[in-house]
């Protein structure tokens, strides 16, 4: 695993040089000598393993930091903090669990590779390091993301974006994953937008992988016997965004998740996400 991580880190500056020669300013990065800060806090409720509605209470904090190194390239460092509280369900043998806070982080390189009129195209490389968890060992994941966007300077429709990301863990017992991200913004007023986002995750594994990893929690994410792709879960975000002075933004989204584990009962999750972002000149 360490060897793969080192190879990835070595490739980042090489890849950056290639993108720098072909990119056009604008699109997906902060801009030269710019710093973008974003903080999000989400509270949500979900069904527990026995199907009891709102049997789990979760809190998620995300802090994103992005630094513009050229007009069309940026480096980001993001931190994630998560915890959950499980309510007791005596009838189904589920005990109360207050859980603990876990923390993870990722380092990413993003670049705009083309901008034609109101259309932009970009790419992102990411190295994500997960919390040690019960095993007391860290795990890492590499991801490659392709991005496309369209901006509309006038009218009700403002912006749309699509991202496709391939994720691969540096561990044999974890499957690859595809992340599909669809976003759109609409103008409600001069400083108020309405944001809609669909986020879907699909896991990939061969039949031999399923045979070698006979974990019930893993098998549930795949078609059994005659396929190798399964939707893990789907998330929906929607809500207003408010532009403030001095390049600041606050927003509140309603969130909703449906698991796609293939079980007869699909667990649901719903909540609220509060966010704040601000741009700085360095």
Image (spheres, rainbow, N blue to C red):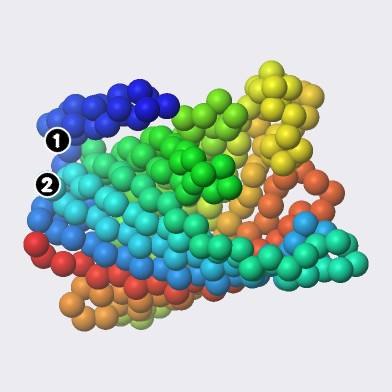
x then y, percent, for residue 177: 54, 36
SS category of the residue bearing label 2: strand
Residue 70 numbered mark, or none: 2
Give the quarter of the image for residue 112.
Answer: top left
Q: How many marks?
A: 2
x then y, percent, for residue 231: 65, 42
Q: Is residue 261 left or right of residue 181?
A: right
Residue extending farthest to the right is 91
On the question of residue 194 being in view, the answer is no
Using the image, determine if residue 137 lies above or below residue 266: above
Compare marks 1 and 2 and give the one earlier in the sequence. 1
Count residues near mark 2 (Cα–Cα under 10 Å), then give few for <14, some for 14-19, many for 20+.
some
x then y, percent, for residue 259: 69, 52
Using the image, determine if residue 277 lies above or below residue 30: below
Q: Is residue 49 left or right of residue 160?
A: right
* Disc 1 to disc 2: CB gap under 8 Å: yes
Name which residue lies at 36% across and 68% down. 39
Residue extending farthest to the top is 208
x then y, percent, for residue 214: 74, 29
Name which residue lies at 14% across and 35% down. 20
């Amino acid at each position: 695993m360490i060897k793969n991580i080192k190879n990835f880190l070595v490739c980042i500056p090489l890849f950056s040089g290639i993108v720098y020669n072909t990119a056009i300013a604008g699109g997906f990065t902060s801009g030269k000598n710019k710093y973008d800060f974003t903080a999000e806090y989400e509270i949500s409720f979900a069904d527990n393993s026995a199907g009891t509605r709102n049997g789990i209470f979760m809190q998620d904090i995300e802090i994103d930091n992005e630094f513009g190194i050229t007009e069309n390239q940026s480096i980001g460092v993001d931190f994630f903090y998560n915890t959950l509280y499980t309510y007791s369900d005596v009838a189904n043998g589920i005990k109360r669990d207050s859980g603990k806070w876990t923390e993870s982080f990722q380092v990413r390189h993003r670049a705009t590779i083309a901008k034609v009129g109101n259309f932009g195209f970009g790419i992102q490389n990411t190295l994500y390091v997960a919390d040690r968890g019960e095993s007391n060992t860290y795990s890492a994941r590499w991801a490659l993301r392709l991005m496309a966007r369209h901006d509309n300077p006038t009218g009700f429709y403002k912006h749309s974006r699509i991202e496709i990301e391939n994720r691969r863990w540096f561990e044999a017992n974890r499957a690859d994953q595809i992340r599909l991200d669809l976003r759109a913004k609409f103008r409600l007023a001069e400083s108020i937008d309405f944001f809609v986002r669909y986020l879907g995750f699909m896991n990939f594994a061969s039949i031999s992988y399923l045979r070698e990893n006979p974990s019930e929690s893993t098998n549930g994410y795949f078609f059994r016997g005659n396929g190798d792709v399964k939707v893990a879960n789907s998330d929906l975000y929607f809500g207003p965004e408010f532009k403030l002075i001095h390049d600041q933004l606050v927003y509140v989204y309603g969130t909703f998740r449906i698991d796609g584990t293939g079980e007869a009962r699909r667990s649901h999750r719903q909540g609220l996400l509060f966010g704040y972002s601000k741009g700085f000149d360095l």
